[in-house]
Amino acid sequence: MNIVLCDDDDICRNELENIIYGILINNDLNSDIILSTDNPDDVINYVATNNQITLYFLDIMLTKNCSGIDVAASIRARDSLSPIVFVTNYPTYINLTFQHKLKALDFINKYELHTYKLKIESCLKIVHNRQMRGYMDCLNIPYGDNYCSIPYENVYYIDTIPGTHKLVAHADDGAYE
């Protein structure tokens, strides 16, 4: 599973990275942080070229020009399956996630130190378990201990490989054996 972090506070983002890496190692989860940034445009550019289910951790208050809500709306415009977790010190903003219909997985308060790490771990485990079972409305292709989930709407056709007992799913972003 791919993980993306976006927080304009370097200290908070680095702490979140360290917590996530510790949880991944301690729970033997096959995931990686592929983008950690303070720039919302980096996340929006990633979303524009990404076709994988990705777990997003977004600060709700990023810059004066772009909020985590704006980034989440950009994610949802292209990707309705990837889970989004808001990590913030503004718990009163939770209603915005419902007003914008963003389907947030969780809303974690950075400064509730007694639950911060536990909630992050819970989100990682939930998403990992969902990925292992596959996603709804997707073609879920097992590979090793993981699944590749391709939304049905992105699958062009499925073909057989001559002389083998294998199939190839041809999708808008490539072929999956």
Image (cartoon, grey):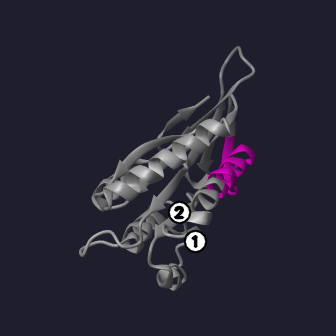
Rendered location of residue 81, percent (x, y): 58, 59
Quadrant of the frame with the N terminus: top right
Q: CA distance from mark 1 to mark 2?
A: 7 Å
Q: Is residue 72 above or below residue 30?
A: below
Report whether residue 30 is seen.
no
Residue 77 within the magenta-colored segment of the rendering: no
Rendered location of residue 133, percent (x, y): 75, 47
Rendered location of residue 118, percent (x, y): 64, 58
Q: Is residue 60 left or right of residue 99?
A: left
Q: Earlier in the sequence, mark 1 or mark 2?
A: 2
Given residues 41 and 174, the one toward you in this image is 41
Q: Is residue 134 left or right of residue 117?
A: right
Residue 129 within the magenta-colored segment of the rendering: yes
Given residues 122 and 141, the one toward you in this image is 122
Q: Which residues are magenta?
A: 122-140
Which amino acid type is marked by label 2? Ile
